[in-house]
Image (tube, rainbow, N blue to C red):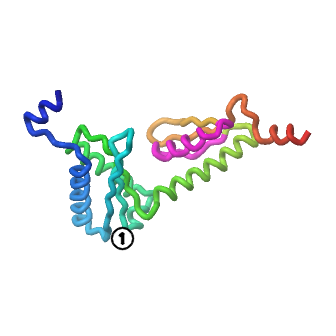
């Protein structure tokens, strides 16, 4: 039915090109108005099972402003662009990611490294350990990483947006110390 009304009233198309143009024009305006010394590159990747991913990579002398305070400015750009696309193309399901100098990969690697250390402690000591309070996007990275190891489980604890992660040994899984003792006998 929406297709009929779109044809009748001239509804907006949601092709990747139009979304890309909208994002490009929006970013150009923000950079000019904010007097940032930044440039950006937009790439669109169509995925088989979803609508696609629009990746924006910033570069320039103001990169550190975007990375400062745990990437909050990158998150703000990403959220703003998602809202602009949702407002102009309500039916569009394009995912937008914003990065600068590989910051997102570095941040994820640091989260995973800390999760690995806590996982090792939980397995060796056979008790629960806690990861500091994290925002949802960071918790997702940690939970997905820990889900790959059947020896541990994880759960978010707390109220509000920022929650701690409890990492604990899975029931029935042999912890590392018990496995080594059994092998040595």
Residue at the far top: name it.
1
Residue 60, above or below 84: below
Q: How many marks?
A: 1
* Mark 1, other Cα within 10 Å: few <14 / some 14–19 / many ≥20: few
In-image side of 182 versus 23 (left or right):
right
Residue at the far bottom: name it.
61
Residue at the far left: name it.
8
In-image side of 141 versus 149 (left or right):
left
Element on which disc 1 rests: loop
Where residue 149 sits, quadrant-wise, is top right
* Image x and y of residue 172, in percent: 72, 29
**Quarter of the figure that contains the C terminus:** top right
Name the residue nearer the viewer: 4 or 23: 4
**Residue in the picture at 63% in, 39% down:** 167
In-image side of 47 versus 89 (left or right):
right
**Residue in the picture at 66% in, 50% down:** 117
Name the residue nearer the viewer: 63 or 95: 95
**Residue in the picture at 50% in, 42% down:** 140
Magenta span includes 51: no
* Image x and y of residue 14, in percent: 22, 43
Magenta span includes 141: yes
Residue at the far right: name it.
185
* Image x and y of residue 1, in percent: 17, 27
* Image x and y of residue 62, in percent: 36, 69
Where residue 94 sits, quadrant-wise, is top left
The residue labelled by disc 1 is: 60
In-image side of 154 versus 97 (left or right):
right
Q: Which residues are magenta?
A: 129-152
């Amino acid at each position: 039915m929406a297709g009929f009304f779109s044809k009748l009233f001239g509804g907006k198309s949601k092709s990747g090109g139009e979304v890309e143009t909208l994002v490009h024009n929006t970013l150009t305006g923000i950079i000019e108005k904010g007097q940032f010394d930044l440039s950006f590159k937009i790439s669109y990747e169509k995925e088989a099972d979803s609508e696609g991913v629009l990746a924006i990579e910033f570069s320039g002398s103001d990169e550190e402003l975007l990375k400062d305070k745990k990437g909050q400015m990158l998150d703000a750009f990403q959220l703003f662009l998602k809202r602009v696309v949702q407002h102009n193309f309500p039916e569009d399901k394009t995912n937008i990611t914003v990065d600068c100098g590989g910051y997102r990969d570095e941040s994820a690697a640091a989260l995973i490294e800390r999760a690995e250390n806590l996982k090792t402690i939980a397995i060796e000591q056979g008790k629960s350990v806690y990861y500091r309070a994290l925002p949802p996007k960071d918790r997702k990275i940690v939970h997905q990483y820990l889900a790959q190891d059947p020896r541990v489980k994880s759960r978010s604890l707390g109220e509000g947006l920022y929650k701690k992660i409890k990492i604990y040994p899975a029931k029935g899984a042999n912890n590392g110390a018990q496995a080594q003792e059994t092998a040595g006998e």
